[in-house]
Image (tube, rainbow, N blue to C red):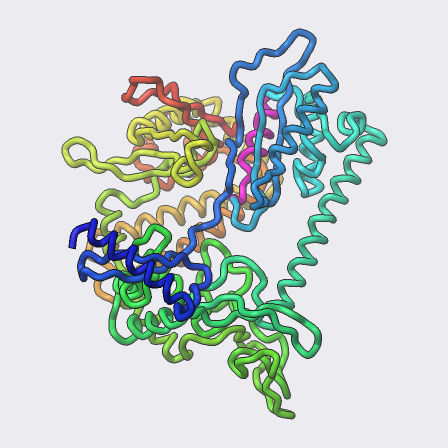
Amino acid sequence: MDMQMATETVAGVEAGATAAERSAPKPVPGYTEELIFDEASGEVRTIYRRPGRCRQGKTWANFTEYAGVTVCEGTKPIYLYLRLSKYHRDGSDAIDRQRVDLTRRLGAEGCWTIVGEYVDNDSASPYAARDRKGYTRLKADVAAGRVRALAFWKLDRLDRTADQNIAFVGECIAKGVDLRSHQDSTEELNAARGVGKAMRAIKAVFGEMEADTMSDRQLGSKSHLAENGFYHGGQRPFGWMPGPRVELADGRRGRPLVPHPLEFPAVVDAVRLAAFEGKSTADIAEHWRDRYGIVGNDGEPMYQGTVHRTLTSPRLLGYRMRSVPEVNRGDLMQWVVRHEQDVVGMCRCALCTDDPTKPRVAVGEVFHKVGDPLVAMRPACDLATFLALQAALKARDSVGVRRTKAKYGSKVRPLSGLLYCGHCDHKMTAQPRKLAGGRAGVRFRCKTRQNRGKSVCPGMTLGGEGAELWVEEFVLTYLDDDKLAEARRLVDEETTRRTGVSSVQTRLAEARREKDGIRAMKESGFSYKGTEGVKDYRVDMDAVNERIEALTAELAASTGTAGPVVEAGSNEELRRLWAGFDDARRRAVYDQVIDKIVVLPAKPGVNAFDSGRLQAQLRF
């Protein structure tokens, strides 16, 4: 059957469906139903596209310097800071409104020319980036003296944390930055002492208190909803959906999570296929497409990662989960909500009754003990099946991906996390590549364009080999005899003032060396052999990764800079020792010398490495 005949067949089926409208099944909630022609079978079948991820209708660069703007005579340049803490999906955005209000206010004063803006959009949303790129760059530019006047809509738009707000405004005043606000008094903002300073502090404290009050109120409401098995917003678990609103005997109302008519049977099938029939996540994704018509938003089978997350989640047991971190989740059972007291006499959980309005009653009977998981929705399997499923998934865990990465060099590069894109100020990511002669190489790339669009960042790439050689020589040249002496002095002062900082740095470098050693032993093929060896390898890697994370957090919590972790008394000795340093030890030195390296755009037509593109910001 050719494509024209297939198109006519689909049209005929759609027309027939219209004629039989009353007998047609109800639309599947949350899915887009389509008829497609399957070339393999020569039949027309129905597929259901999952909804795509909600994205912002508009995005802005974190910093924009207005092009072609000339500061008029009698005016001074001023920058805007625009921030929205929660994106409104109604097409209208507070960023534009803040820009209009500030433009009108500054225009009325008649002595300002707006030359650029810093923007943080959705920076406080639960699904947004945790670091505010616009605000971070603004603080750096204020500290460097590049911003001489700043306007914002309201004082709490800068920071809802009182002490940080007070500190930043105080730094602006100390640097001579002229502050303007649409909602606050100019005299109060720019007062270095007295009543104005007190009023700023009071407003900052009340702003933080307002944010805490709203957070407590929302968390309390969601806690009560979760306790009763009600849906309280966010992304629903795959396999379940919010049901009709019900009212309990005590007057509490909500929407319980009920099995999804399409997804729940697919999840039950997936558990059986993975636990007892040895099917992979790719097989299950294809089974969902062929049997249920479930496909991704792009029309292709579901991502294997989505299938794997579904099969490893304790939600299969109907458990309610709360405050699950985005990364480093560890054992997912630790995030399961549990009963805080014995449930005696009556229970309305999904394990005891199918209808929360009709609880199970038995006088004196203990339904659940304190610490038992809270079952908030109908389980897709029992505990024994769930444990068998997890064992099957672990036994088939792919090691081939790690071997593929190891072929091109899976080790953390010495510059990972130090390079920042000069367009958007996001960290650049190391990517493996093949060089001439089949050699393994690396390049650094900013993924902001890929993740958030070219309107936010036009893109940035940098060859890794040239950058690593340049940074190595830069650091060795910078750490001359005088700088090493200064570093030793800083180490002594810091050790006296904050005991243990330098030891943390040394332990962190040792942990990184140990991680490289474990990886080298695994890649050599002489250690960690067989199934038990792979398990031991994972245990060892998890342990050293936990140590690295703990030491990194401990080091980040300390203030000040304690100089490079080296035992060299002179630059000549440093260069001699440097040849024996591994990547972890060299990275420890880089971390203590360099704060960040900003990568500037390449010159048109120049493909070779250009050291002029790298601007290192030093710590001491």
Q: Which residues are magenta?
A: 129-144
**Left or right: 185 in relation to 138:** right
Residue furthest to the top in view is: 73
Residue closest to the far bottom? 363
Residue ID at (25%, 53%): 8
**Residue 9, position as x, y percentages in the image:** 24, 57
The one nearer the camera, 499 or 619, is 619
Q: Is residue 356 left or right of residue 330?
A: right
Q: In x, y percent, where is residue 76?
A: 67, 14
Quadrant location of residue 78? top right
The quarter of the picture where residue 474 lies is top left
**Residue 300 at what x, y percent from top left?**
30, 54
Answer whether residue 138 is magenta in the image: yes
Q: Residue furthest right?
A: 195
Q: Residue at x 57, y 86 (%)?
A: 367
**Residue drawn at (57%, 47%), measured in percent from left and top?**
125
Total tally of numbered discs in the picture: 0
Looking at the rendering, in which quadrant would you find the N terminus?
A: bottom left
Up-down relation of residue 294 to residue 485 (above or below): below
For residue 566, say whether it is visible: no
Q: In front here: 350 or 136?
A: 350
- Considering only vertical position in the picture, is 352 above or below 309? below
> Any magenta on residue 268?
no
Residue 271 x, y percent position in the rendering: 34, 72
